[in-house]
Amino acid sequence: MPTVLRVANLRFYFFSKEGPRAHTHVGPLNGGEHPQMKIWLDTLEVAFLRGFSKKAENDILKFVTKNKEIFLRSWEEYFND
């Protein structure tokens, strides 16, 4: 489960055995189950959301949008190496 970034109390990561469509998961830094979010990197759409407030969802989407290239580079380096 590669971690891409740790920011504030959040961890941005993906699972090593997931499908080919690039995305990131977002969860608590402490590794707890909730809240959780999954964002497709090509469209920046939320694929899954549980436990985040609307404000937190928007803040996370803005952060991922701003740092999209970092997330895509990490995905490509992991799956294409």
Image (cartoon, rainbow, N blue to C red):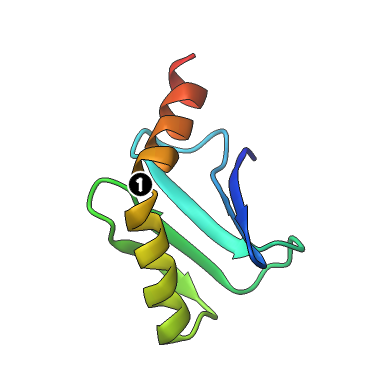
Q: Is residue 61 left or right of residue 8?
A: left
Looking at the image, residue 52 lies above or below residue 69: below
Residue under the point 48% across and 85% down: 53
Point out residue 9 in the picture as x, y percentages from the top left corner: 67, 67
Residue under the point 44% across and 59% down: 38
Question: Considering the image in quadrants, where does the N terminus appear?
Answer: top right
Point out residue 54 in the picture as x, y percentages from the top left corner: 40, 85
Q: Residue furthest right?
A: 30
Residue indicated by mark 1:
68
Q: SS class of the residue under badge 1?
A: helix
Q: Nearer the viewer, residue 5 or 50?
A: 5
Q: Nearer the viewer, residue 59 or 14?
A: 59
Q: Residue furthest top?
A: 81
Which image quadrant for residue 19?
Answer: top left
Residue under the point 39% across and 56% down: 64
Residue under the point 43% across and 39% down: 70
Disc 1 residue type? Answer: Lys
Point out residue 18 in the picture as x, y percentages from the top left corner: 48, 38
